[in-house]
Amino acid sequence: MKVTVFGTGYVGLVQGAVLADVGHQVLCVDVDAAKVAALQAGQIPIHEPGLDKLVTSNHANGRLRFTTDAAEGVRHSEVIFLAVGTPPDEDGSADLQYVLAVARTIAEHMTGPRIVINKSTVPVGTADKVRDVIAQGLAARGASYGFDVVSNPEFLKEGAAVADCQRPDRIIIGTSNPASEARLRELYAPFNRNHDRIVVMDVRSAELTKYAANAMLATKISFMNEIANLAERLGANVEAVRRGIGSDPRIGYHFIYPGAGYGGSCFPKDVKALVRTAQDTGFEPLLLNAVEARNEAQRNVLFERISAFYGGQLQGKTIALWGLAFKPNTDDMREAPSRNLLEALWAAGARVQAYDPVAMKEAQRIYGERGDLVLVDNVDAAVQGADCLAIVTEWQIFRAPDFEQLAANLKDRMVFDGRNLYDPAQVASYGLGYVSIGRQPVQPKGH
């Protein structure tokens, strides 16, 4: 099948590359000429395991192409994906300007029937808005072509997006049009062979399903962080609690790891957008408000603990920081807990030596050159001459450090672990102090 994808961000580029890899002819459209030129030259703008090979190989064989020509994109295919950004507006609602701009473009250049597929995460009712914009655009041209607007939300995890796209656990199709359903079943047939992963529902239910899924996962994280804070005050160990409740199949182990709060491009934005959507209907979402409030507080926990250790006197201190991305296997720092920590440390007069396997270019782009941020080449360089160490991203490379070396390098022999990577007793055996989430702190030897 011929497929057009508007947008070459995480969702559009991954979806386009994966569809091309099973034999579809995919044309990706983006307004960013520099990004399109880079993609044509084999340069991938984001870090996502396996994506570079997928893009370069399918571009080389002609199944995956990139263009800035929107008219060509609309002409190329009857099946058009909308995978453009929906950033949060000032009031927390999703900003639909890019989605609706593509809808106007489609109406302007349509020469026959089209199936328009909303892949972007959008509020309930967006398909209706897209449908109205296209209908108005066609009417202004005096044209009459059949079209349908389908909701087909993505469920990709950054850092595992390619695998999630190649082996989806479900494919949600929101449409009441049997012809559109049949066309999408044909499109997704290569991913639906072992058992039927396709779930068909009405458009509005499909739109809500995406937000509900992310809100549920965010709720689990915030709930576990709430329990972690309680565990510390009660003298309990949240890791033991996690294992105890995770063994219940009704709960499971996924997304119940306590930490420094959730971040990234999805959970913070989508919870805010769902809260706003609920409020627009006159309904106050008390649970979602609490999920968001707990996460906002949790993102400051590491700084509060570092500050408490130093009695609020951080001026002139050097903090080693392991991890900048909001999660492993990505360079995405959107809403990353590291940003809360960095900015709070700087405001308190501290200096930071940071290392992340892939996100340092992104940190440089966000913060530029500044005297209180040094980006180093490896984990050892980060702790050289530092007063203490803070960990905010659970990269594999941080899981088995040389504790003896840490004790020798860190002036105050303190580790503040926002991801509970280590056994407190093991850390303490090297004379290090250790503060984690939901477990009792250990003071450094001699402190």
Image (tube, rainbow, N blue to C red):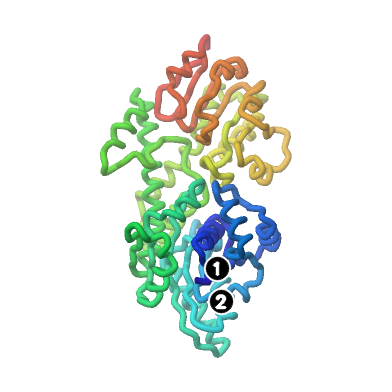
- Disc 1 target residue: 25
The number of numbered badges drawn on the structure is 2
Mark 2–mark 1 Cα distance, whole angstroms, equals 19 Å
Horizontal placement of 380 versus 425: left or right?
Answer: right
The residue sitting at 62% across, 31% down in the picture is: 348
**Looking at the image, is 107 positioned above or below residue 416?**
below
At 33% from the left edge and 63% from the top edge, which residue is drawn? 199
Residue 56 appears at what percent x and percent y? 62, 55
- On the question of residue 210 being in view, the answer is yes
Residue carrying label 2? 106
Q: Nearer the viewer, mark 2 or mark 1?
A: 1
- Which quarter of the picture shows residue 280? bottom left
Which percent across, then down, holds residue 77? 54, 75
* Residue drawn 44% across the image and 21% down it: 424
Instruction: Give the quadrant of residue 238.
Output: top left
Whether pointer 2 and pointer 1 mark residues with C-beta atoms closer than 8 Å, the reply is no
> Is 324 situated above or below 21?
above
Q: Secondary structure at mark 2?
A: helix
Q: Which mark is residue 95?
A: none
Q: Secondary structure at mark 1?
A: strand
Q: Nearer the viewer, residue 399 or 229?
A: 399
Q: Residue 352, percent across and down?
A: 64, 31
